[in-house]
Amino acid sequence: MPVVRADGRGAVRDLVAHLHRLGRRRLAIIAGPAATTTGQERVAAFREALAEYGLDLPDRYVGQGDFQADSGRRATERFLDLAEPPQVVFAADNLMALGALDAVRARGLRVPDDIALDNVAGGEQAAKALAEKLGGSGKIVILQGLAGTSAARERAEGFAKGLAAYPGIEVVAQQPADFDRTKGLDVMSNLLQAHPDVRSVIAANDEMALGAAKALGSKAGDSVQVVGFDGTPDGLKAVEQGTLYASVAQQPSQLGKIAVDNAVKAIEGEKVEETIKVPVKVVTKETVAGFSG
C-alpha cells in the first residue's frame, strides 16, 4: 500500500490516472480538519479526480487529521480495520503521512517507497536567505527541534552550512524547543532576557518560529526577523502577514510528481530508492502566493 504525502491538484489527477490504469479502485485520503479551507479543498480535489473515472469516495475512505503524525496513524489504523481496506492512502500532509507509514508497517505491511524533504538543503537555504536579509551581520538565535530526531539533526546541519559563509553572523544561542509552539514561546522569552539585541531567530519548524514570534511581540518582522521551516498553513499565513520573514516549504508539484512516479514503480514491482530527497524552497512574502501549505 503506497502512502503518498502532500500533493497539488494536478498531481492528484495524475496519481489517480496512474493508479486507475493499474487497476486500483479503492483509494482513501487523510485530509486536514474538515472545518479548514485546506482540508476541504484537498478532499474536493481528490473526489473530483476519482469522479473522472467513475469512482466514488465513500465516507469510510475519508480520514480527518490535524496535520500531526498521530492523526495520520489513527486514520490509517481505521482504514486497515475495514472489511475492505483501501489499496492506496493519500495523506495531504507530510506529518500525517509519517503516521500513516507507521500504522502500515505496524501491521507487517511493506511500504517500499519513502519520500522525504531535503532537510539539510532546506536548512542551508534558510540560513543563507536570513543572512542576506541581515546584510551579512548580526546576532541570531537558533531554536532546535526534538533532540535525536533526523529532522532536527539534518536541519541543524543545514543551518550550520548556510551560516558558515557569513562570518559576520554571530549565533549567540542554540536551544531545543522540541518542535512545539508553546516551548518556542517559553525558550525565546528566556533567551531575550540574556540577548535583548538579537536581530533574528531561525527555527527548525514553523511551530517554534510562531512561538518565538509571539515572544518577540511587535519586534517580530520589524527589528527581528524570524524564519521557520515546513511551510505549514499557519506558518505561510504569518509569512504573508509579515510576522515571519520566511519559511522553508515543499514544492507541491514536484513532491506530487515524485510521489506518483515512485508509487507506480512500487506497485509494478520496480526497485525504488530507500529515501528520495525532494527539493524545498524558501518562501517569503513576495512568493507566498504560490504555496498552499
Image: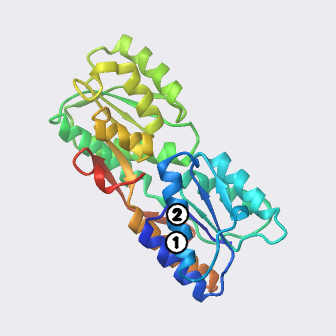
Residue in the picture at 39% in, 67% down: 253
State the colouring used for the structure image.
rainbow
Q: Residue furthest top?
A: 193
Q: Is residue 163 above or below residue 225?
A: below
269 horizontally vs 182: left or right:
right
Residue 196, position in %: x, y? 30, 14
Q: Residue furthest right?
A: 83
Asked if the residue at tag 1 contacts the one at tag 2, i.e. Cβ–Cβ closer than 8 Å, the answer is yes
Q: Nearer the viewer, residue 44 or 291?
A: 44
Q: Residue furthest left?
A: 135
Residue 120 percent across, percent down from the top left: 41, 52
Three-letter code, disc 2: Ala
Which amino acid type is marked by label 1?
Glu
Left of 177 or right of it: where is 123?
A: left
Quadrant where the image shows the N terminus: bottom right
Residue 224 lies, with reference to residue 280, above or below; the image says above
Q: Label 2: which residue? A: 44
Residue 73 in view, yes or no? yes
- Which residue matches tag 1? 48
Left or right position of 69 against 246: right
The quarter holding residue 137 reads top left
Residue 88: mark in rendering: none
Residue at (44% x, 15% y) in the render: 190
Q: Classify mark 2: residues with Cα within 10 Å, few (<14), some (14-19) or many (20+).
A: some
Quick check: 163 above or below 8? above
Q: Seen in the image, is 10 located left or right of residue 53?
A: left
* 3D distance between C-alphas at marks 2 and 1: 6 Å
Query: Is residue 163 or residue 93 the one in the foreground?
Result: 93
Q: Secondary structure at mark 2?
A: helix
Q: Dot 1, crowdedness within 10 Å: few (<14), some or many (≥20)? A: some
Q: Is residue 174 visible?
A: no
